Image (tube, rainbow, N blue to C red):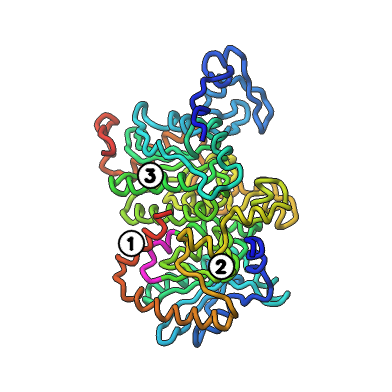
Amino acid sequence: MNLMGLFRSPQNELEKGGKEAEDAGIRSACPRCGVQLPLSDLQENMNVCTACGYHFRVGPRERIAYLTDEGSFYELDGDLFSRDLLGFPAYDQKLRNAKLASREKDAVVTGAAHIMGHPCALFVMDPNFMMGSMGTVVGEKITRLFEFATGTGAPVVGFTVSGGARMQEGIHSLMQMAKTSSAIRRHSASGLFYLTVLTDPTLGGVTASFAMDGDIIMAEPGATIGFAGPRVIEQTIRKKLPQGFQTAEFLLDHGFVDLIVPRAQQRETIGRLLQLHDPGSIGMTEEEMGGGLE
Amino acid sequence: MSAYDKVMLARSKGRPTGAAYIENIFDGFVELHGDRRFADDPAIVGGLALLGNIPVTVIAIEKGTDTKERLRRNFGMPNPEGYRKALRLMKQAEKFQRPVVCFVDTSGAYCGLGAEERGQGQAIAESLMELSTLRTPVISILIGEGGSGGALALALADQVWILENAVYSVISPEGCASILWKDSKKVKEAAECLKLTAQDLEANGVVERVIPEEDFESAFAQIKELLAETLPGLIATPTEELLEARYQRFRKF
């Protein structure tokens, strides 16, 4: 595998990001309302359209910055990367492209963090890495995170975004559903809290395993959430899907999601839910809670 | 035989369906219906039976054997209520300390409007979580098609066996070819790449056993014999040991 590609320097203004990008007047069109948004406005607004409230997909590092107390995130298993287990055509190339597009080694980032002073284990999936598809590394990192959280008595907060299981790893990807579910069950049986936040899109084997296993299931407004992808259903029933089918709001109506929380309020709501599962912390200041996951 | 030939064989209409396995392997089957929440799903057959002298809970995905039956059984594609019925029967097996035997044969969990409305993903997720610590032995046997999460929902087991010409895959070769290559003609190549044959699965440690298929009468007899050999040992295993082994069985992937 050619690793050098991973370490190339930024090649254009967009990749450099920050000030240059802003000065260049780069804008993003909102996929829902079509408004042209200056990148700086969008970034300031947590990648939510300032005109219509559309939640853009965001990578794990941005979410971790929105969510966790400054400097509190400690990454775990950041060195794991996928291999082409089955000799699947073009998988190596896809992995290389995904690493470039996401600047991550695979489709989930895991670690320990504080949210509003409350320690937790955290996983955040990455839409820029093969649309968050779940292969062995995703399953392994999430399993290890739950084992770590069970061992340390920590709650787990998990953000899902995934097109489903990763075809290129065949049956090994399917087995990740069993592996993660088993680890989550052990965490749950220890009386520990698991909160999932379903973001756009959450589908397939991820919906049918750890996304739906939360004690509390939160969703981002407008997110597509389902088992079968919309195209597959349309092909099966040979009809167009009704408006709003498989949205977060649809799942709320049908009783599969506890609450929908816009990105700007997620930190506070998650902090409050963590507090409610840790009665000892009630009435303490963030400094008093201090400490972390050892 | 190519991987795609095996897929065609696994799907072929002459193949015995779940109900035939129940009939030929167990005695005195009593079918039990319904998930107690919404409906009874004819795509999954479940109930109680005897294996020799051992009472067991038996669950089988049933595709149906003629056109009318196939329609009624939704071609063996379960809805959420099917998985919820299966889980209800498994929890009963746990209560009464009966082992569970599952026969899996599905192209996948159904992809329809109602299935989504009633939480197909949630139903499978719950089945996986519950099976991972079900305090009674579970053996799952893949007898035809093992279609992704819809098959795995009944195959998180202490041992997983497979018929010689059955397949088990994360996605159908057709789905794989159309998503990856936007070309349905590459289906044979996809079948090869997915490593979905019984022989590949045994080599990768996904199944413990491949059951020969010279003819199905002898396959039934062999499964009966293997179950009679294996179940007493699993029943005698202390529960914590059984669950630890089940955890490690899937932890290795």
Q: Is A255 on the left-hand or right-hand side of A73?
A: right
How many marks are shown on the rendered structure? 3
The residue tagged 1 is B244
Q: Nearer the viewer, residue A167 or A234?
A: A167
The residue tagged 3 is A156
Reading the chain from its start, which is encountered first: label 2 or label 1? 2
Q: Say if the magenta span includes residue B132.
A: yes
Q: Residues within 10 Å of mark 2 (few under 14, many from 20)?
A: many
Image coords of residue B239 (percent x, y):
31, 69
**The quarter of the displayed image where residue A67 is located:** top left
Q: Is A207 on the left-hand or right-hand side of A144?
A: right
Instruction: Report the residue at 42% width, 40% height from top.
Output: A80
Q: Amino acid at mark 2?
A: Gly
Q: Nearer the viewer, residue B201 or B30?
A: B201
Q: Amino acid at mark 3?
A: Val
Q: Say if the magenta span includes residue B27.
A: no
| Image disc number at residue B82 | 2
User: Can the viewer see residue B166 in this picture?
Assistant: yes
The answer to the question of whether label 2 and label 1 lie on touching residues, with beta carbons closer than 8 A, is no
Image coords of residue B12 (percent x, y):
68, 71
The magenta span reads B129-137
Identify the chain of the residue marked 1, using the numbered disc in the image. Answer: B
Instruction: Report the residue at 49% width, 78% height from top.
Output: B223
Name the element at disc 1: helix
